[in-house]
């Protein structure tokens, strides 16, 4: 099912996801595993739908050069309804970022996560020429 949302270029291990900037090359096994085993050991299973929406319809896309390569940030905010400890609905705001590295004209998927402010502050301090797409 995870593979079915990708373009016709999908094979067993790689796929290309269309974005407003350029296609993002995704290692399917890595991306799928990244939802369950990641830096913070946080189960990101409920982020899967937002993953595709963030790349397909981001609010903005920015580039930032680091270590001789351009990191490409796809950003989209979301509200999610979750249950609190008492079983009541609680609205949660998520700052979701999909990040890739631009190499040889391709964007290779690297990570996807909810940011608590540090990445957003970094993006807000970039110069205007680093913004490569803004949703109209």
Image (cartoon, rainbow, N blue to C red):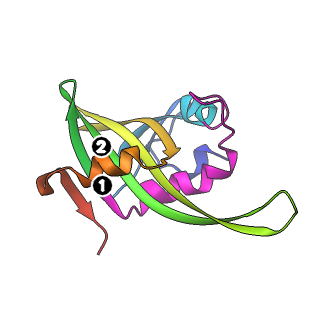
Residue furthest to the top in view is 67
Image location (x, y in percent) of residue 6: 51, 49
What stretch of residues is rendered in magenta? 35-60
Q: Is mark 2 on a helix, strand or loop?
A: strand
Residue 75, placed above or below residue 134? above
Q: Identify the image quadrant of the C terminus.
A: bottom left
Can the viewer see residue 22 in this picture? no
Q: Residue at x 53, y 29 (%)?
A: 13
Quadrant hosting residue 65: top left
Q: Residue at x 72, y 67 (%)?
A: 90
Q: Which of 86 and 96 is in front in this view?
A: 86
Can the viewer see residue 27 in this picture? yes
- Mark 2, Cα crowd under 10 Å, few <14 / some 14-19 / many 20+, is many
Residue furthest to the bottom in view is 136
Q: Which residue is drawn at 43% across and 54% down?
A: 55
- Compared across the picture, whether 83 is left or right of 54 comes to right
First along the sequence among labels 1 and 2: 1
Image location (x, y in percent) of residue 79: 58, 67
Residue 67, placed above or below residue 72? above
Q: Which residue is under mark 2?
A: 72
- Mark 1, Cα crowd under 10 Å, few <14 / some 14-19 / many 20+, is many
Q: What element carries label 1?
A: strand
Q: Do the residues labelled 1 and 2 touch (CB within 8 Å)?
A: yes
- Compared across the picture, whether 107 is left or right of 67 comes to right
Q: For the image shown, how many numbered marks are present on the structure?
A: 2
Q: Which residue is under mark 1?
A: 61
Image location (x, y in percent) of residue 84: 79, 60
- Compared across the picture, whether 62 is left or right of 90 comes to left
Residue 57, placed above or below residue 114? below
């Amino acid at each position: 099912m995870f593979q079915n949302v990708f373009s016709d270029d999908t094979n067993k291990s790689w796929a290309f996801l269309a974005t407003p900037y350029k296609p993002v090359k995704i290692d399917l096994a890595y991306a799928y595993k990244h939802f369950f085993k990641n830096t913070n050991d946080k189960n990101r299973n409920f982020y899967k739908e937002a993953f595709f929406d963030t790349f397909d319809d981001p609010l903005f896309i920015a580039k930032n050069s680091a270590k001789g390569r351009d990191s490409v940030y796809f950003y989209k905010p979301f509200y999610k309804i979750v249950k609190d400890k008492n079983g009541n609905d609680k609205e949660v705001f998520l700052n979701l970022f999909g990040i890739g590295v631009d190499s040889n004209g391709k964007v290779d998927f690297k990570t996807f996560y909810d940011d608590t402010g540090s990445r957003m502050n970094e993006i807000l301090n970039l110069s205007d020429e680093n913004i490569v797409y803004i949703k109209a």
